[in-house]
Image (tube, helix red, strand yellow):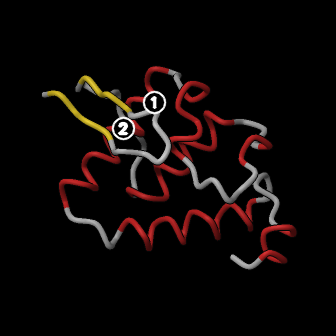
Amino acid sequence: MTDDELSAFQINENKDRDTLFRLMRLTLEEFGPKTKSDISDCLEYVISTHSHEKYWRQLVPHEIPLDEVENKPEYLNLLYQSLFDRAPTSCKKEIIISQEIPLEGLTTKE
């Protein structure tokens, strides 16, 4: 996004959020099946454990002022549905999410 687009962007507006989710989905489509599965597992873990505050900056693009999201659990559910065309389920795997920046990725333990 350009600087002007970023300054006009309103994360709580459906139109802007839908645009962001569409762009995120296009990026996701560039990844392979293992990475897609890991991202799905990670989001499901955060959603099902209600740990969105702990991992917020590991989940969302830093360019967007996401601290302004009014309902973070709803946002993550909508994001998940937008990326994977289904509602999230309870995560059955143990997930380790890197809290280092830059991110080093995530690990799932089966």
Q: Which residue corresponds to the image point at 57% horizontal and 49% vertical from the top-left?
A: 60
Quadrant of the image containing the N terminus: bottom right
Is disc 1 surrounded by few (<14), some (14 to 19) or many (20+) residues within 10 Å?
many
Question: Is there CB contact under 8 Å for labels 2 and 1?
Answer: yes
* Mark drawn on residue 46: 1
Q: Image check: 34 left or right of 7?
A: left
Name above or below for residue 59 compared with residue 95. below
The quadrant of the image that shows the C terminus is top left
Mark 2 — residue? 42
Residue 108 or residue 41, whichever sits in front: 108
- Rate crowding at label 2 as few (under 14), some (14 to 19) or many (20 or more) other CA atoms within 10 Å: many
Taking the image as shown, residue 51 lies to the left or right of residue 19, namely: left
Q: Amino acid at mark 2?
A: Cys
User: At which x and y percent is residue 13?
Assistant: 80, 58
- The amino acid pointed to by label 1 is Val
Q: Position of residue 46 (x, y in %)?
A: 45, 30
Q: Which mark is residue 100?
A: none
Asked if residue 85 is positioned above or below residue 4 in the image, the reply reads above
Asked whether 56 or 88 is in front, the reply is 56
Residue name at image x 50 percent, y 43 percent = 101
Asked which quadrant contains residue 17, the reply is bottom right
Q: In x, y percent, where is residue 76? A: 56, 42
- Determine whether the residue tagged by mark 1 lies in a helix, strand or loop: helix
At mark 2, the secondary structure is helix
Point 52% across, 31% down: residue? 55
